[in-house]
Amino acid sequence: MREFWIIFKQAFMSKAKSKTFLITTAVAVAGIFLLANITTIIEAFDDGEKEGTAIPVVADNEAIVDRLGRQLAAMGEETEFEVTGDSRAALEDQLKEGEIESFLILQAPDGNAIQAEYVSESTELFGFPMMLQEALQSIQTEMRADEMELAPEQAAALFEPVVFEQTAVSSSGKTEEEMNQARILVYVLMFLIYFAVIMYSNMIATEVATEKSSRVMEILISSVSPVKHMFAKVLGIGTLGLGQMLLFGISGYLAVKSSSAVSDLSEGFFSEMGLGNIPASTIIYAILFFVLGYFLYAVLAALLGSLVSRTEDVASLITPLTLIIVVAFIIAATGLSNPDAAFVTYSSYVPFFAPLVMFLRVGLLDLPWWEPAFAIGLMVLTIGVLGWFGARVYKGGVLMYGPSRSLKDLKKAMQLGKE
């Protein structure tokens, strides 16, 4: 076992100390904190630009402008308007010269129908223009209600939303609120599993191919068996991957908790997103499916990496593995809106799809214990079979040199492994 732990440590430390890994990890952690505080950063720039400025308004009814300011204030948007006598052409010239950022043309020709045009340097699909339209819509509704002599409560009754609630009566169903809270957590963990499997599997295949191309492999297999070498590589890089994912998770938690944008609402944020009371079973399943999914694809990656003699050939040979995990992610993403669909249920038992699809079903549905247990059993069995088969291919593949002929080299590698 001494040789195993030596290779394990070498695989772990060589990647952990590499500049690429350190820079990638640092950039990812910085990106997490940046995204958590992006609202604060944007507001800081916006406050510097908008301080002391008012939006010019060309209006034929100043009362509507006053009502618009009050309506926006009630919606939480503090915006100042200034009625101007300048023409549209003059305002457009000021806009082009950077003297103003936008202006508003507001007309009510018949007294109860509002016509508005918001002009800015670039088209904004969301944000303030949408809020402006909503505020003007509310004002127009009030004006027409006054024209029809409706009481305020009568006007409000016209726009009262329908009370609608969706309830599932199946034993595996959850309420709509529970489903919405679970989706965000499942979606985040699905992304982690997806990217981790692709990134670390490719790392293993590249590591094996690099040792072969530098002829280091010939020295290694003279002192340790190829089987020990393969599983030491898989475990070493897998441990590194779990550590990196844990670091990302802790960074994300701390970033959201420390963000000034949500400092006063952090508890509400986590509860609304379904992160305030995460079931212990969901966390256990997430770790379990992550580990099993990693080993499943890592053994395949090591097997494929042993068939190539140049690192340039790794990408083409590992493409089928990548396509499998992409298909699994597409099925899982589709199942977010309908986890009870037949194709989602059946594909969740396929070992190569189970890490994403079965975890999706476990997170969104109240499944009987035997369903995830059966999928986990199939994955463990598949990992065992792939480990046995992969060890035989790996044993012969690390001794093969020359141009790769893709999967046709499997037979030749197995024959060499028997010798």
Image: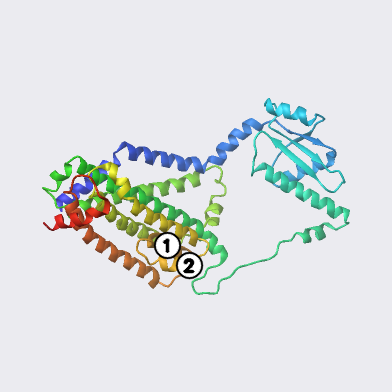
Please give the name of the residue rendered at 84% of the width and 50% of the height, measured from the top-left corner.
143
Judging from the image, what secondary structure is the residue with disc 2 in?
loop
Answer with left or right where residue 32 lies relative to residue 109: left
Asked if residue 349 is positioned above or below residue 24 in the image, the reply reads: below
**Residue nearer the viewer, 363 or 86:** 86
Q: Whole-Å distance between the Cαs marked 1 and 2?
A: 12 Å
Callout in the foreground (1, 2): 1
Image quarter of the C terminus: bottom left
Q: Is residue 235 visible?
A: no
* Callout 1–callout 2 Cβ contact below 8 Å: no
Q: How many marks?
A: 2
The three-letter amino acid code for the residue at tag 1 is Val
Classify mark 2: residues with Cα within 10 Å, few (<14), some (14-19) or many (20+). Answer: many
Picture coordinates of residue 68, whole percent (x, y): 77, 43
Judging from the image, what secondary structure is the residue with disc 1 in?
helix
Answer with left or right where residue 306 lies relative to residue 181: left
The residue that mark 2 highlights is 365
Classify mark 1: residues with Cα within 10 Å, few (<14), some (14-19) or many (20+). Answer: many
Image quarter of the N terminus: bottom left
The three-letter amino acid code for the residue at tag 2 is Leu
Please give the name of the residue rendered at 21% of the width and 41% of the height, measured from the top-left corner.
213
Please give the name of the residue rendered at 38% of the width and 54% of the height, measured from the top-left corner.
323
Picture coordinates of residue 23, whole percent (x, y): 36, 37
Q: Is residue 83 visible?
A: yes
Coloured how? rainbow
Picture coordinates of residue 177, whole percent (x, y): 57, 63
Asked if residue 380 is positioned above or below residue 110 in the image, the reply reads: below
The residue that mark 1 highlights is 357
Please give the name of the residue rendered at 54% of the width and 40% of the height, measured from the top-left corner.
38
